Amino acid sequence: LLLLDTHAIVHRAYHAIPDLATSKGEPTGALYGLVTMLLKSIADLKPDFIIAARDRAEKTHRHELFEEYKGTRAKTEDALVEQLKRTGEVFDAFGIPTLDAAGFEADDIIGTVAEQAAGKKDLQTVILTGDMDMLQLIKNGRVTVYRLLTGISNMKFYNEEAVKERYGFGPENVADYKGISGDVSDNIKGVPGVGEGSASKLVQTFGGLDEIYKTIREDGVESVAKKTGIQKRYVQLVADNEESAR
């Protein structure tokens, strides 16, 4: 099963390909990139099934949970918006079904389908995306990520081992890591003043947020700093900002 993160793919194509247009002046570069990546993925993976997950225009439950979610993002350019609207025509032409749901992002759709598909022993699921957040969905050798690196043809496979090689911990702790380090692109602050290096060391040493905060409470900030090799002031920041991390 090939799961397409439509917005991420089209966004990547839009910025990777020079402006292309029809004779009527309609922008087509991002759509051309989408088709190119789709054909490459079909040739490389030979999927039995393909589903495209799409974002909707309205706000999602994520904005209800966190009002400032994606608050720093610039308005999407009109030429990109126009092409995002036309992705449905591309998928219809390929005979690929699309999924979206009111109040939810494409990420939520992909996460739901991947979780369901992971329970099927005879099915391998591959997520095509440019988004590192998707690495948390990798599971049991049955769900992997085919990530766009640069341009529209440079891609990399991520399985559990590749995630451990990249971060020093597995997919199950990617969300905990982001909780501490934050995510600038989504305007998620994490623990202010604590970066990726300290977040990595904490997760590598103790595991998820529950284990990290349990250890800080039981052993103290100084002990955690010694065990991880992180400066005490950074561990103190983590201790003082549990609500933001969670």
Image (cartoon, grey):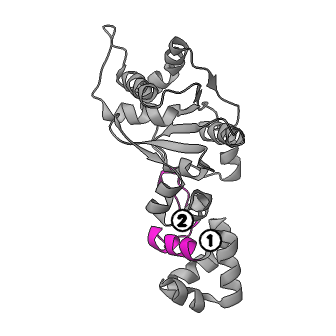
User: In the rendered structure, which segment of residues is drawn in magenta?
Assistant: 180-205
Residue 238 visible to an observer of this rendering? yes
Quarter of the image for residue 27 reads: top left
Residue 194: horizontal and vertical position, in percent? 49, 72
Residue 74: horizontal and vertical position, in percent? 45, 42
Lower position in the chain sequence, tag 1 or tag 2: 2
Above or below for 38 versus 243: above
Towards the viewer: 188 or 196:
196
Disc 1 marks which residue? 207
- Structural crowding at the residue carrying mark 1, measured as other residues with C-alpha within 10 Å and reported as few (<14), some (14–19) or many (≥20): some
Residue 102: horizontal and vertical position, in percent? 70, 31
Quarter of the image for residue 103 reads: top right
Q: Quadrant of the N terminus?
A: top right
- Which residue is located at x 59 percent, y 76 percent? 238
Residue 238 falls left or right of residue 64? left
Residue 5: horizontal and vertical position, in percent? 53, 35
- Mark 1 touches mark 2? (CB < 8 Å): yes
- Which residue is located at x 59 percent, y 48 percent? 141
Residue 72 visible to an observer of this rendering? no
- Which residue is located at x 30 percent, y 8 percent? 23
Distance CA(mark 1)–CA(mark 2)? 8 Å
- Structural crowding at the residue carrying mark 2, measured as other residues with C-alpha within 10 Å and reported as few (<14), some (14–19) or many (≥20): many
Above or below for 23 versus 186: above
Towards the viewer: 63 or 4:
4
- SS under mark 2: loop
Label placed on residue 95: none
Specify the amino acid type for callout 2: Phe
Residue 121 falls left or right of residue 5? right
Label placed on residue 169: 2
